[in-house]
Amino acid sequence: MMASLVPSTGYAARRNRLETYFDRTASATWARLTSDAPVSGIRATVRAGRNRMRETLLSWLPADMTGLRLLDAGCGTGALAVEAARRGASVVAIDLAASLVEVARDRSPAGLAIDWRVGDMRDPALGIFDHVVAMDSLIHYRSTDLVDLVETLTRRTRGSMLFTFAPSTRPLVVMHAIGTLFPRADRAPAIEPVRERVLRAQLQASIGHARIGRDARVASSFYTSHALEMVAA
Ligand SMILES: C[S@@+](CC[C@H](N)C(=O)[O-])C[C@H]1O[C@@H](n2cnc3c(N)ncnc32)[C@H](O)[C@@H]1O
């Protein structure tokens, strides 16, 4: 069964919350986390884990990307987009959060081919790519919307689509459950843990035009994320 090309109402609601959270509530914190500025212990482990994850995803892309088009889907402050452009790719980097795209643009070295955009990664006007990367930008969506996003983005990919999900490991589920007991106005939109086995089955059932390739998990105390590669058939 093919996933729907029309996003669910749940998708729109979650996307709007993510936009508010990353554009305003957490913008400064996120900009600091993704900089070289000193951060506290927990955030330092998250930063280290995220650096490892970014290196893993980059290691799955060609070393020379001259002539290739890459979409950084949910680019945040743009580190992956910058590295892909340094390899010669022509990059479209898009994020819902205008404030983070502004930070990304300011941080980006001059002379790189990066088209910074504010908007939804689903936008069909972005066109077709050789590679799409969604690092930690799908982790807040429920599994039906996650699969739908992967389906949509793999359709726009000639080569590979790389994304991460939050694996449903016991400690993560417990932390997630505890987190929801404490209402706070500025709490981050929930991360939606997914069972790897279930996700693989859903992807295989929903996506006929790409197959699952490499995978890797990064676990660095407070950061756990699992990368999957979808390879265009
Ligand atoms: C956890 S951050 C990760 C940012 C970046 N990929 C990185 O690894 O540093 C998730 C980002 O995804 C963005 N995002 C979530 N859903 C999106 C969508 N539908 N379209 C564009 N950006 C989205 C959020 O605004 C946020 O900046």
Image (spheres, rainbow, N blue to C red):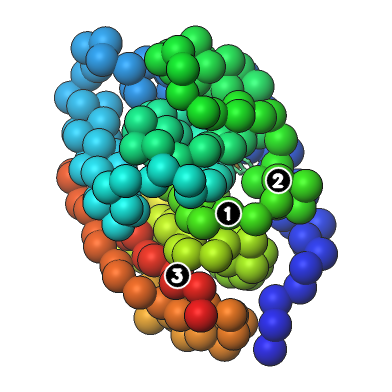
Residue marked by disc 1: 129
**How far apart are labels 3 and 2 at the CA level?**
19 Å
Spot occupied by residue 68 in the image (x, y as percentages of width and height): 48, 48
Describe residue 86's horizontal placement relative to residue 36 as left or right.
right
Q: Nearer the viewer, mark 3 or mark 1?
A: 1
Which badge, 3 or 2, is on the more N-terminal residue?
Answer: 2
Residue marked by disc 3: 230
**How far apart are labels 3 and 1 at the CA level?**
13 Å
Which badge, 3 or 1, is on the more N-terminal residue?
Answer: 1
**How far apart are labels 2 and 1 at the CA level?**
9 Å
Q: What secondary structure is marked by label 2? A: helix
Q: Residue at x 68, y 29 (%)?
A: 118
Spot occupied by residue 108 in the image (x, y as percentages of width and height): 44, 17
Spot occupied by residue 55 in the image (x, y as percentages of width and height): 24, 44
Q: Is residue 11 above or below residue 81?
A: below
Q: Which of the numbered marks, if any, corresponds to residue 87?
A: none
> Is residue 25 among the parts visible in the rendering?
no
